[in-house]
Each structure stands twice: as structure tokens, then as C-alpha cells.
Image (cartoon, coloured by chain):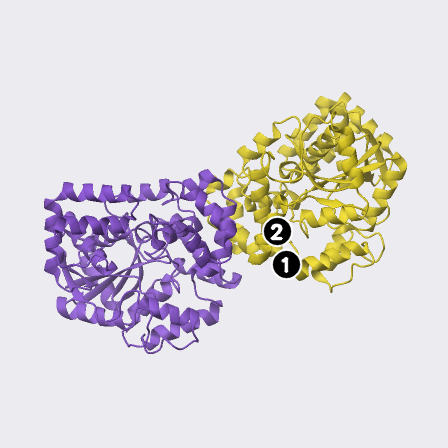
Chain colours: A purple, B yellow
Amino acid sequence: MKSCGLIVEYNPYHNGHHYHFQQAKEITGADCVIAVMSGNFLQRGEPALIDKFSRARIAVEQGIDLVVELPYFYAVQHSELFAKGAIRILDSLQTDAVCFGSEHGQIDEFQQLYQTIQHHHQEYQESLKDSLQQGHSYPKANEIAFYQVSNQQVALDFTKPNNILGFQYVKNIYDLDSSITPVTIERIKNDYHDLDIQHPIASATSIRQALLYQEEGSIEEAVPSYTNDVIAQYKKTHGTWHHWQVYFPLLKYRVLTMTISELQAIHGVKEGIENRIVETAKAASTFQEWMELLKTKRYTWTSLQRIFTHILTNSQKSEIENLLTDHHPKGFRILAMSKKGKEYLRYKKKSIEIPWYTSNKPPYPYQLIDERVDHAYYSILPMHSQQQLAKQPYLRPIIKDA
Amino acid sequence: MKSCGLIVEYNPYHNGHHYHFQQAKEITGADCVIAVMSGNFLQRGEPALIDKFSRARIAVEQGIDLVVELPYFYAVQHSELFAKGAIRILDSLQTDAVCFGSEHGQIDEFQQLYQTIQHHHQEYQESLKDSLQQGHSYPKANEIAFYQVSNQQVALDFTKPNNILGFQYVKNIYDLDSSITPVTIERIKNDYHDLDIQHPIASATSIRQALLYQEEGSIEEAVPSYTNDVIAQYKKTHGTWHHWQVYFPLLKYRVLTMTISELQAIHGVKEGIENRIVETAKAASTFQEWMELLKTKRYTWTSLQRIFTHILTNSQKSEIENLLTDHHPKGFRILAMSKKGKEYLRYKKKSIEIPWYTSNKPPYPYQLIDERVDHAYYSILPMHSQQQLAKQPYLRPIIKDA
């Protein structure tokens, strides 16, 4: 049974995602499509609009066969660790191919860049170090180093986040000596950060903007109707979608009752940013304002949001670093599956060396961190919603029978 | 200039408090009345209905000359430490007398009990230890030990919380070899826990009940009109009064994102209660329900509320224990004063050995803990209220000019 892996966040699942899924299936000839998906918090350090179970349900309804959670300690990280986690899970699952969207659409360019960097490893590292010392952010320093070693002979545009992620996927496949074949598809229209929803393939950013800041119903054109239904139902049942502003009072409370040494122990906090976080917390009236007061050249919006996520979920350096020392994850968590997905697991059972789980019940190895992260995520909802949703991880998995 | 100290919480200042204040002044012949008052959280482990600055303002408006804050680490404690902190502050302030209300109204009985316990120290300690081992709460064990050593020859009713507190005041005055004269006034009518407000001297409990669970305005009969005005204005400006239920979502979020070892580090958490706190947090829909699920014979309602206060304010054993090692407070914080109060401080300036502060600005020794506790207290208010009220401790002190 041939399989293809996708690395996704589905925040929310839209027409562009659906196009990519179908293209990937066709190009790779896969019978089974596996999505590794971030959980309740995302790579860019944001709460997902709706929870991971709702997003997993949409994915299987749209035809994905297996939705596997990318654990929190891989998901809410810069692109290198995010990619490492996702590729390791797909490698463990013995996926034949990984198909990612890129601005460029040519896999050769990614492979060539990998070779170039391998050959100029030292030069690359030195350039990276120099730029960081000059106060550039990590992504910017990376971009500069890429340009320097590739000597303008690589056509990849490193300012595009999907190219960066794509490169990291390819790099991790090769570093791991994995049998996964990397495949890329050119992304159609609509920039990652584009705020215009006037197109059937709109960006997830524009869809979220429309949901949060415009009237309801305006996303219909850009998402499958099932996505639209689930999103509307979520708000109807639980009173809100999840976005940073609703967490702002909680986060501010948390920051202002922590000691400085407790803040320093949080994953991602370094170089005295803890003092700025406390001082700006007192002055800010909204989350947006807090971020604007906090932002510096060295700290990108995204890296600050990741720090806020780790504060909110009380994720400490010692814990995260310890979890990251494992070469492969201790196990993976299946959020949803189709009949085909179930079959795939049965078919591969003997050769998959890592245990998988369809519930958070012991001996699921990440129960404690998952429960903590999930509680933080649901904490802004009405009490009855919190109680109902906190039970989900212990119920039967989402299985699409059709 | 003769002075008399009162140990108070004024939650809120009512006719009974006013009567007690006037009686105390008359009986002791004091020119200056000093109130040592709990801050934003109270001895029984509850947030005060309105903040400490509002309560201090009411007190000076009603005639109190000096309102000194009983620091958090003394205030939110069982009666022994609460009394110790208050007496030490009044002793530092060279107060001539301390006047407390009691069910009994006879100071001799308190003195006699002190002597009896001194004479039967070992017997008392053994009885206390026995009862605690049998699973009794600390107050109950104390009560049993009192009865045992007093051999029924002391007329004090140890089930009355004001008698217990009164005894601790007397004990601390003698233990400290202080020159303070203890004085007691019989409390008039209305039990501490009485819920009936149909009397001009109603209990603070019944007044809070009326405010929180009945229509507005119904407390007019039981409080000075100034109290009524400030209380009404507080809600009008800030949208709510402070009581546990409004902190419930925050507290639940906090508990469910802490590790067990973090919970164990919180002041007051012991004997495995941390596990019960986490388990019951998941099941409870309201604060009341949480408390009912959590309560055991060993843990009184009050001791559990104190634990919740320390969790909310992130007050750890190491910090509180360290602060309690000081024989006298490092300084005291004046929340409000009249002209007479100001004069008293000037008059006693040379003989008061401990520095006093009218602002939280450095070198005020408890700035960090006060700021953290205050942020926790204000965190349930709208953002503009939080910002406005967080500035108060750094403004000029409340001075009544008249």
C-alpha cells in the first residue's frame, strides 16, 4: 500500500489545502494519505482557531486517511525542529513520499541547496553566527547564510516561509537517511500572508482575518462546506474561537504573578527578554499592543508568540529539551482515521517500530504535557465546554466509516 | 499622645466595626487609633470584596487615624501567625493598648488561659499532636487541647473564632514581653457567621451575602453611608466585586497547568492534597463545588481557601517561610492616615525602630510580593481598571485632611 505524507496545520482546512491533498495523492500515486498535524497550538506560536479534534475530523471527512498529531514540543518551534519532528514521525510510519507546497515547485532546487550547504557547512555556520551576533533574528540570519553559501546560484526565495519549511523537510529526510521521497507542488496564487479572501484559494491568514474581524459566513467561498459548518458550530457551542486576544487577560495574569527566575525557566526565554515581557505586560491594553511594545530586531513576532505559548502552557526548558533528546518520538497519537488509514496501520503493524495511541490513556508517553497544553487551550471557554472538551482525548478515536 | 491598636479586615467596614472603634477609643482614652488591616486577601483565605485602598479610605473617613497593612505573609495565615504579625506591628508602633472584640468580653479569662497553658505546656502540645494525628484540623485540635489543659475552669468558648484570635493577641503580647495593654470589648449580638442582616449591627458575612446574592442597596441599614457609597462606586467603575467565584476560571487554569512539584512548592500544600486539588479541579463547575469536593475532616474550608489564595498569588513555601523568619517586619506600609495619624508618626519618629513607607517604591521591602499579590487580585477586572488600580501603590498615600 503506497503512502504519502503531508505536514499540515489546517487552521482551518481550506480549498488550497484540499487542492494540495488531491495533487499530492495523484502525483505520488498514494493509496493512503497521512497528515502530520500540529495540535492545539501552532508553529507560529498561536492557538488554533478550533481545537485539534475538530480539525482532525474535518481532515478525514475531506479524504485524509490518517491524522497524526505533531507533539507540542516539536510543533511550537522554529522551522528546523518542526520539520525534524514531522519527518521523524512520517519516517517511523514508513511513508513512501512527503509532498509539500512551495513557492518554487521544483524539488531539484531544494536538493541542490542541501548539497551546497553540506559542502559549505563551516562557512554557513560562521555566517549564521555572525548575523546572530549582529542582532538579526534567527530566520533572517538563516536567510543571509543561505544566500552567502549558495552564491546566488540557487533560485529559492528564502524570504518565503514555505520555501524555508520545504528546505527543512528535505534536509531532515537526507540527514535521517530516510527512504522517504521528497516531492513538492507549486503553491497556487495567494501569498502566505495575503489578507485578501476574494479567491477560492485564499490563504489561511485571510480566512482567519475574515472570521475574526468581519461578519460571519464570509469564508464560504474559500473553504469546503464541512469546514464552514464545523467552524460555525464550534462558536455556537463554545461561545468563541481561539485567538490570542481572548487569552490576553490569562497570559497577563500569569506573567505578572511569575517570578523572574520562573520566567527564565520557560522554553524560549533568553537574553533578558523576561524583564521586557514583565514591563510591557503592565503597559499593554491588548495582546496586539503587548506584541508591538515587545518586538525588537532580534525577536520576530513569531518567536515572541512562541514564548507566549510556552508561558501559557507552562512549558519549561528542562522539560522540552529533555523531550527533544529522543531520536524518534516515544510514540505517536492518532487523532482521526479513515478505514483506509486503519488498514494501513494494520498492514504496516510489524514494521512500524514506534507504538501508536488512539487515546491519551496511559501508557501514552505524552499524557502529562498534552493534558497541560490542552487545559491551557480550553481555559478561555465556558466551564461546561472545558469539561466536555477535556474528555475528548480519552474517548474513542475519530473514525470515518465511509 | 495615647494610642490604641485595632486588628481588622473591614470587609467591609460596618456599623459593628464603627461601634467597636468608638468603644475602644473611649475605654482606652486614646488620642490616636491605629488599625492594622489585611490587604487584598484576608485571613480566611478570601479576596476582599473591594481593594485595600478603598477599605483604608473608608476607615480614615470614619475616624481611624492610621491604617497599616498587615503584610500578605502574616495576613493569609492561621490565627497564630495572623496575630503574631499584627501584634508585632503594633508593638513596633509603640501602641499603648490593643482592643479586640470577643464573645466573652472579659480580659481576665484570656490572661488566665495564657497562664494555664504556660503551666501545662507539654500536656497542651501532646494533646495537640494527638488530635492532629487522629486527623483533626488544626483549629479543632487546638480547641481540644485548650479544653484539656484548662480543665473546664476557663469560661472561654473556643468554638468562637473571635475568642481564638483574641487569645492569640494576648499570647503574642505576653510572649513578646510587649508593653501593650490588652483590652477586650464584648461583641454585641450577631454571630460571626450569622447570615441575617436585619439588624443595624449585622455581621460582615451577612453583609457580603446580601451584596453578592441579593439586590443592591440592601446593606444600607448595616453600614455607614460612606461604606455604601464606596462599595457601589467600586462595582460601577470596575464591573464587579471580588469573590472566589469570579477567580474560579483563573484558578482552575492555574492548577491544571502546574506540575505536581510546583503545586507542592506552594505555601500550605502538604500531605498529598495537591493530587486531590488537581483531580477535583477537573470535576468542579463552580468554586463552591470545587471546595465541597475537596473538603475533608483534616482540611477546613478556611485552610483550603488559604491554599487557593497562595496558588492564585503564586506564593511559595520557600518565600513565605523566609519572610516569616524575621523577628519583626522589615518595615510597614501605611495605607491611609488622618492628620492625627501623621502627627503620631512624627511624635514617635525617634523611638519607632522600623522604617515605614507610604508607597511601594523601593526601598519598600515587600514590593515584589505585594505587586504579585495585587496583580493576582486585580486580574479579574477589565483591563483599564487593572491598569488604573495597579498604579495606586505608587501614588501619594491617602490622607484625610479634615
Asked which secondary structure carries label 1, the reply is: helix
Amino acid marked by disc 1: His
Nearer to the camera, A398 or B218: B218
Where residue A210 appears, as percent x and y from the top left, is 39, 72
Residue at 70% x, 31% y is: B84
Q: Is A76 located above or below residue B349 in the figure? A: below
Kindly indicate whether the residues beneath marks 1 and 2 are on one polypeptide chain.
yes
Q: Is B70 located above or below residue A113 in the figure? A: above
Q: Is residue B76 left or right of residue A204?
A: right
Mark 2, residue position = B389
Residue B187 seen in the figure: no
Q: Is residue A94 left or right of residue B209?
A: left
Q: Chain of mark 1?
A: B
Mark 1 and 2 residues: CB-CB less than 8 Å, in contact?
Answer: yes
Residue B298 seen in the figure: yes
Q: Chain of mark 2?
A: B
Q: Quadrant of the N terminus of chain B?
A: top right
Instruction: Return the disc, 1 or 2, that comes first in the chain's sequence.
Output: 1
Mark 1, residue position = B238
Asked which secondary structure carries label 2, the reply is: helix
